[in-house]
Amino acid sequence: VQLQAFGGGLVQPGGSLRLSCAASGSIFSIKTMSWYRQAPGKQRELVATLTIGGSTNYADSVKDRFTISRDNAKNTFNLQMNSLKPEDTAVYYCNADIRGAGDIYLRNYWGQGTLVTVSS
């Protein structure tokens, strides 16, 4: 099982960007999906979480601007980022608890990270 994040890039303040995280491999189910970010010189922080039951949680700094969602058919989850600010600049990582086919345990996986730069 692997996670691959993509969709990062350069965007102007106030703009929007959509990140996606694709899970590949023999997957039975994806339980909890999250996005983290790490800005230069700072610790990695949790941005948003989506549970299999549909509950969401957001960092205060992104509430009402970011939306996490999933596409079950494609084993993909997304982060829609609106009204972006320079302080949103960071490497964004996807993370998920996944049960592989034939596996009885949930395992935690990280994507490789995608850079988001918000600058004029």
Image (cartoon, rainbow, N blue to C red):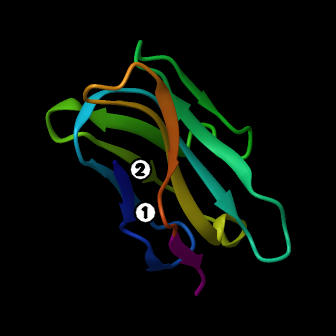
**Is residue 33 at all visible to an observer of this figure?**
no
The magenta segment is 114-120
Q: Residues within 10 Å of mark 1 (few under 14, many from 20)?
A: some
Residue that sits furthest to the top in the current view: 53
Location of mark 1 (residue): 16
Q: Which of 5 and 66 is in front in this view?
A: 5
x and y, in percent, of residue 98 in the image: 41, 32
Tell me what residue is drawn at x 58 percent, y 76 percent.
118
Q: In x, y percent, where is residue 102?
A: 27, 25
- Reply above or below: 119 against 2: below
Relative to residue 74, is residue 79 drawn left or right? Answer: right
Residue located at (35% from left, 26% from top): 103
Label 2 SS: strand
Question: Mark 2 near mark 1, Cβ–Cβ under 8 Å?
Answer: yes
Tag nearer the camera, 2 or 1: 2
What type of secondary structure mainly makes up the magenta span? strand
The disc, 2 or 1, on the residue closer to the chain's N-terminal end is 1
> In the rendered image, which quarter contains the C terminus?
bottom right
Q: Mark 2 points at which residue?
A: 80
Q: Is residue 89 above or below residue 73?
A: below
Q: Where is residue 14 in the image (x, y as percent from the top left)?
A: 53, 66
Assign a secondary structure to mark 1.
loop
| Residue drawn at (36%, 68%) of the image | 7
Q: What amino acid type is highlighted by mark number 1?
A: Ser
In the displayed structure, 107 sits above or below 111; it is: above
Image coordinates of residue 28 in percent, x first then y, are: 26, 26
Three-letter code, disc 2: Gln
> Which class describes the residues within 10 Å of circle 2: few (<14), some (14-19), or many (20+)?
some
Between the residue at mark 2 and the residue at mark 1, the CA separation in whole angstroms equals 7 Å
